[in-house]
Amino acid sequence: MSTGQGSAGNVIAALCSLVIPGLGQLIQGRLLMAIIMFVLAAVLWSIVLGWLIHIWSVLDAALFKPAASGSAA
């Protein structure tokens, strides 16, 4: 199963972040980034700029590449 950019997992994570900023990062196991995205979106939506974080959250989830583990074959 592919885990890099464009994989089904990243597409699902991006769709989740579209609904709730940070949810895609949480699904990918990136708790700190999920909290940052969620809090920034909540704060910035109060001044109508939350859409910036919302879009950033979706793109970050979609383009995420996990760190390579082990040796390359």
Image (cartoon, rainbow, N blue to C red):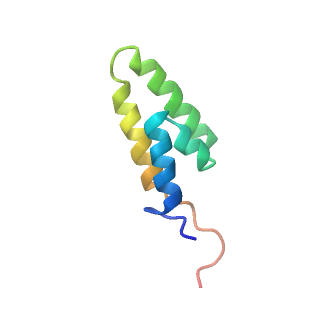
Residue occupying the point 36% across, 38% down: 55
As drawn, is 5 to the left or to the right of 55?
right
Farthest residue, direction right: 70
Farthest residue, direction top: 46
Residue 33 x/y as whole percent: 55, 39
Residue occupying the point 43% across, 52% down: 62
As drawn, is 34 to the left or to the right of 64?
right
Q: Quadrant of residue 3?
A: bottom right
Residue 23 x/y as whole percent: 55, 38
Q: Count the labels in the image.
A: 0
Residue occupying the point 48% across, 63% down: 7
The quadrant of the image that shows the N terminus is bottom right
Q: Quadrant of residue 71?
A: bottom right
Residue 11 x/y as whole percent: 46, 54
Farthest residue, direction bottom: 73
Residue 41 x/y as whole percent: 45, 26
Residue occupying the point 64% across, 68% down: 69
Is 67 rendered above or below residue 16? Answer: below
Is 6 rendered above or below residue 41? Answer: below
In this orientation, which residue lies closer to the viewer: 67 or 4?
4
Is 29 rendered above or below residue 8? Answer: above
Is 45 rendered above or below residue 30? Answer: above
The quadrant of the image that shows the C terminus is bottom right
